Image (spheres, rainbow, N blue to C red):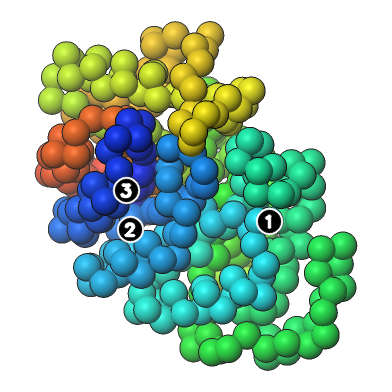
Amino acid sequence: MDFNHFLNAHMLDPATGGVRLYREMTEQAVHAEACGYRGVSIPEHHLINILLIPSPLQFAVHVAARTKRVEIVTAIAVLPIRDMRVFAGEVVQASILTDHRLILGVGRGAFRWEIERMGVPFGELKARFEDSLHLLEALLTQDEVAWDSPWYRFDPVTVMPRPERPVPLMVATMAPEGIEAAAKVGYHIQTTPLSSNNAVLKGQVDAFHRGRAQAKPGTGGRLMLQRGLYLAENDAEAREVLERAHAYYDVFENVWSGPGRVAGGRIERLPRAQTIEELKGSLLICGRDEMIDRLSAYAELGIDEVIASSNFGQENARTLAMMSRFTAEVMPAVAAVRRKVA
């Protein structure tokens, strides 16, 4: 099983400012490569102070200029808020400028407050996303494309320059039926059970394997699981980071499933019913032995890659140190599990 470092890009305190925010995300990306992570993932969100990278392709090129090997994944680029004729050209350019290390992760968007302020009715997201994805893939693979749908109507066009290599696509979805359908096409899949139990995760994994078994030979993608992950040095640090995570999810769930209370770009922190102890069961914030046990279970389940979301508002130096510990103390043990079950 491989590991990917997620560049959370939180600005929980807006006084942090963009210069420091993106400097620290860049430091994490460079350190991830040095530590041996397979890739880094770049989020996309607008008008709010969490997961704040408005242009993931632009940041992907920035990371590529400072690294040599690491895969660079958009996780995820929101298709329904874009014009695919423009975006397809941007994808080709970014793929070239990242030395073809780009994996284009795409999705429909998740935060109603954000999506509707971008002018897209939330109820149209699924249909718009499916149409946009089909159009994007056509633009990236066909010389001339004409389209006629509720959202696009145009005569034949050709995206220039043409892709010189296929751009790998990853689809972000949590629903088992969506996972199976996308895996059947051959896409990489990013999923997460969020705070749900292991039965939900197993359903997602089983759906992926059903879909991949139906994919054309040689086209099967990887299953990438996003998880909150922090390797603590001791119980006290684990508790402190868990408390930070609980406070972060008070903010996250305001725009994920809550009322969407935002003022001046800052998401209001709203208390949730979930306790810290309940949250602990759905995140990997723990010491070495427990971390190895839980990640080994993921490897045995058939997950190819864990996208580690490790920033809950702690100082950047602590995040970098944690990544180094994780590389030294956990990665080799989990790699051994991968070899054993391969």
Label 2 neighbour load within 10 Å: few <14, some 14-19, many 20+: many
Q: Depth-wise, is mark 2 or mark 1 nearer the camera?
A: 1
Quarter assignment of residue 89: bottom right
**Residue on which disc 3 sits:** 18
Quarter assignment of residue 115: top right
Which of disc 2 and disc 3 is earlier in sequence?
3
Secondary structure beneath label 3: helix
Which numbered disc covers residue 80?
Answer: 1
* Residue 339 rendering spot, x and y as whole percentages: 29, 52
Q: Depth-wise, is mark 1 or mark 3 nearer the camera?
A: 3
Give above or below for 199 relative to 24: above
Q: Residue at x 39, y 11 (%)?
A: 276
Which numbered disc covers residue 329?
Answer: none
Q: Is residue 306 visible?
A: no
Label 1 neighbour load within 10 Å: few <14, some 14-19, many 20+: many
Q: Amino acid at mark 1?
A: Pro
Front-most of residues 265 and 57 = 265
Q: Amino acid at mark 2?
A: Gly
Give above or below for 98 relative to 243: below
* Residue 304 rendering spot, x and y as whole percentages: 42, 51
Q: CA distance from mark 2 to mark 1?
A: 26 Å
Which of disc 3 and disc 1 is earlier in sequence?
3
Labels 2 & 1 near each other (Cβ < 8 A): no
Which of disc 1 and disc 2 is earlier in sequence?
2
Q: CA distance from mark 1 to mark 3?
A: 26 Å
Q: Amino acid at mark 3?
A: Gly
Quarter assignment of residue 275: top left
Which numbered disc covers residue 39?
Answer: 2
